[in-house]
Image (spheres, rainbow, N blue to C red):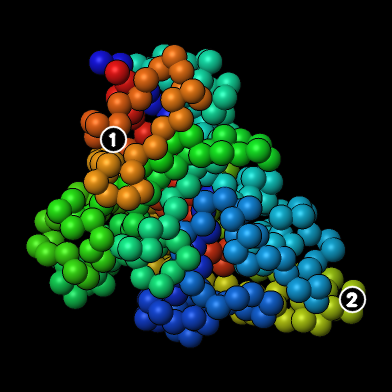
Amino acid sequence: MPTLSISFEGYWLCRLATDPDPSIEQRGVSGFTFAVAGETLLEPSIWTQEEDVKKAYGLKDPDFIDPLASYPRFNIKNIREASPDRAHYNSRGIGINVSKVEIDGVQAADLEAKLINAPCRWINRPQSNGPFRGPIFEGRNQITSDGDPDRFSVNPFVFTISTPGEASKTVLSRFDPMDFEHPDYKLFEIFPNEIVDRRLPTQRFALSNEGLQQIGVDPDNLDSYFTNRMNWLQGKIVEAEAMGKPALAEAYRSRLYAVNFFTQATGPTVLANRLLSRIPLRQLYRHTIRGNASMPPVPMVDAGFFAPYQIDTEKDWEILYYMGQYDGDLMTGYCSGTLDIPLK
């Protein structure tokens, strides 16, 4: 049977506390991520569309809005601007979107025309999540797992695609339970560990040149990544003070302190540097999406939108995706992947 392949990529936001802070730390104390003045407390939900961030948190208070920001999206609370060398991020913002549509490896021009730039999301499922607004990177924190601190799963996993534009509507959605027999179980309730393994990363790339190139970073100039950020932040502090915006200046000053501390105090090489080592790091996930009509949310496909193609919601869908390039100052990362769906 033919296979519909929908590729997607883009930036996500996740304001999570980092080791050695506990996962429920809300301000940031000893890890390399911090909530600064003008932002809400840390909360580890994964956001894949900036409009959802705006809906959840609103705009920044006037004292923290920078009139010299490069794009209006940086008026949204909790979304930070980067230095000009990160034009790829500044211009695109938070958003994982459809980039290509194929059927059996051949461009499906009719569907691609309707789906190109369509928003992709992981949406929340409170029954199998904690008290968070959205899905999170969840792991066993080396307590009952094999001891690898980077083996985290996106959980809960409800993948959706919506039409692009202001009149957006969901045209595809499917839930993948971590434990098929107990779809409402939270991670700490699931045993044995083998049940969780299928959703953990299958490969880890500490220095991924491909990942760097996807976000517009030259691997040969990686060492200058946060040097550029610090120089820019120093200039933003001066600008904010000159505009009579002391609160904004303090927010930039807090960011500068964190970047400076965690790039100077933890080692000169990429892998020894706590902030810089996350930029080239990415992990590969590959698993099926297998939820059925017995577990909400039930598989959903807009048959009219995809016509004349008929999507099979009885068979498992396969998804492959990379998560990485996490910037501890911006608290953003990059995702790219492909969803393979059997057609009838």
Q: Which residue is mark 1?
A: 318
Return the x and y of residue 303 as percentages of the image width and height.
Answer: 44, 25
Question: Is disc 1 in contact with disc 2, using a CB cutoff of under 8 Å?
Answer: no
Q: Quadrant of residue 172?
A: top left
Image disc number at residue 132: none
Query: Which residue corresponds to the image point at 89% horizontal and 76% vertical from the top-left?
Result: 242
Which amino acid is tagged 1?
Answer: Glu
| Viewport quadrant of the N terminus | top left
Query: Which residue corresponds to the image point at 73% horizontal and 81% vertical from the top-left?
Result: 250
- 19 with respect to 262 (left or right): left
Query: Which residue corresponds to the image point at 44% horizontal and 74% vertical from the top-left?
Result: 17
**Is residue 175 visible to the viewer in this orientation of the structure?**
yes
Return the x and y of residue 344 as percentages of the image width and height.
Answer: 29, 18
Q: Quadrant of residue 19?
A: bottom left
Return the x and y of residue 170 as percentages of the image width and height.
Answer: 51, 39
Q: Which residue is mark 2?
A: 242
* Rendered position, 37 above or below 135: below
Which amino acid is tagged 2?
Answer: Ala
* Of 311 and 248, the residue lying toward us: 311
* Of 9 and 257, the residue lying toward us: 9
Residue, far bottom:
29
- 290 with respect to 88 (left or right): left
- Mark-to-mark CA distance, 1 and 2: 54 Å
